Image (tube, rainbow, N blue to C red):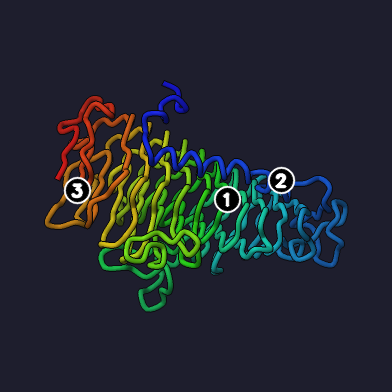
Amino acid sequence: MEMRDSLRFLGRPAFALLLACALLLALTPAIGMADDDNGHRFFVSPRGSDGNPCTESAPCATIGHAVSMAGNGDMVVVGRGTYHEDVAIAVGLTLRGAGRPTIDASGMNNGIVISGDGAAGATVTGFTVKNATFEGILVQQTHGVTISDNVAEGNDQGIFLPHAQQTGECLAVGLVPGDCGEGIHLWSVMNSRVERNWVGNNAGGILLTDESGPTAFNIIDGNIVVDNKYDCGITIAGHNPGGAPGGVPQPVVAGIYGNIVSHNRADRNGVAGEGAGILIAGGPPGTAVYNNQVVENEASGNGLAGFTLHSHAPFQDLNGNVIAWNRFSNDNLDGDFDFSPVTDNQTTGIFLASAAPLVGTVVQGNEIRNVYYGIFTLNVPPIAVIANHFGTGVTVPVLQQ
């Protein structure tokens, strides 16, 4: 059955998401608008000089210098080589790697930071970004950004610092180790795309949060997110208690909603810490992660379940999420003990647990195999066994508590 046909059977949550998708499609012309040939081009090469005019024949030596000269709609083309920089982008330019240049951010906070309303429409493509203390690529408080065809590896190095030197997102919370912001992080970002990136060997892979405002209507598609051993492959985590105070959504204030996570591969994440293939979670009361679609992804060999939903407190909104047409195998290798005394110490494809009953959650058409529990739930409306496909090696298709 085609996806567009199957959506007819998903009911009200999916219908709401279709409206969100329509809004997203209406806005997509703004995404990547910096990649316009009408803008100026600036060139960077390891053999260049920042005393040069950054032309193709007389390139700059540093990415940061070229970026400082560029404006909205301009392009900075970076030649093959290694650049030891923390690049800050505050305008809607295109930063394009030619020949897969490397940004080695060893000893620096980040590799690339895109921030502020002025950076709307920025694009970053074609880079390897590695060894940052925090995120490899951080997108913060902006919209219409595209992060595509990059490699983010070996970032989050701050987790290896002595505990007394760890700060911010590198700090552990209870038994959960810090993640330092993960390989790619969207922090209060809207109408943006993270596509076809390889994100591996960071503390965690791709992270969406809402500390400073909503993170909504983004597309996370076609990424390979593997071997991020201390946290999840793809994390959608509500951090702002203003997202749904008293359980009532405040979408203008905060919350993570209307995002599409599709066609990603999330394997072998969280095995040395605590991490799922794909996670939706809310922290304190008032957090909100609702009406998101997780569709046509693949996850295997992760520390927590292939898809995991954790709603840890009352008066949250983690309702109306759609988990459909994914493939999960051999996940929850470390067990899930976050809802003790209800614990899951068996391999599990999908784990859904909430401190208060969830509504509108759709779990349909997933292919699950090589796990003890196909679907393990707590405080979730009944899920029909026939709604999903349970292959070889599944002992208990659905356990509901």
Q: Which amino acid does label 1 sit on?
A: Asn
Does dot 3 land on a helix, a strand or a loop?
strand
| Residue at horizontal 42 percent and vertical 42 percent from the top | 293
Q: Specify the quadrant of the image occupied by residue 195.
A: top right
Is disc 1 in contact with disc 2, using a CB cutoff of under 8 Å?
Answer: no
Q: Specify the quadrant of the image occupied by residue 370.
A: top left
Position of residue 69 in the picture relative to residue 107 (left or right): right
| Residue at horizontal 41 percent and vertical 73 percent from the top | 166
Does dot 1 land on a helix, a strand or a loop?
loop
Query: Which quadrant, please, contains the C terminus?
Result: top left
Residue 26 image label: none
Position of residue 139 in the picture relative to residue 101 (left or right): left
Q: Residues within 10 Å of mark 3 (few under 14, many from 20)?
A: many
**Outermost residue toward the top in this view:** 1
Position of residue 61 in the picture relative to residue 297 (left or right): right
Can the viewer see residue 160 in this picture? Answer: no
Q: Name the residue under label 2.
A: 98
Query: Which quadrant, please, contains the N terminus?
Result: top left
Q: Name the residue under label 3.
A: 378
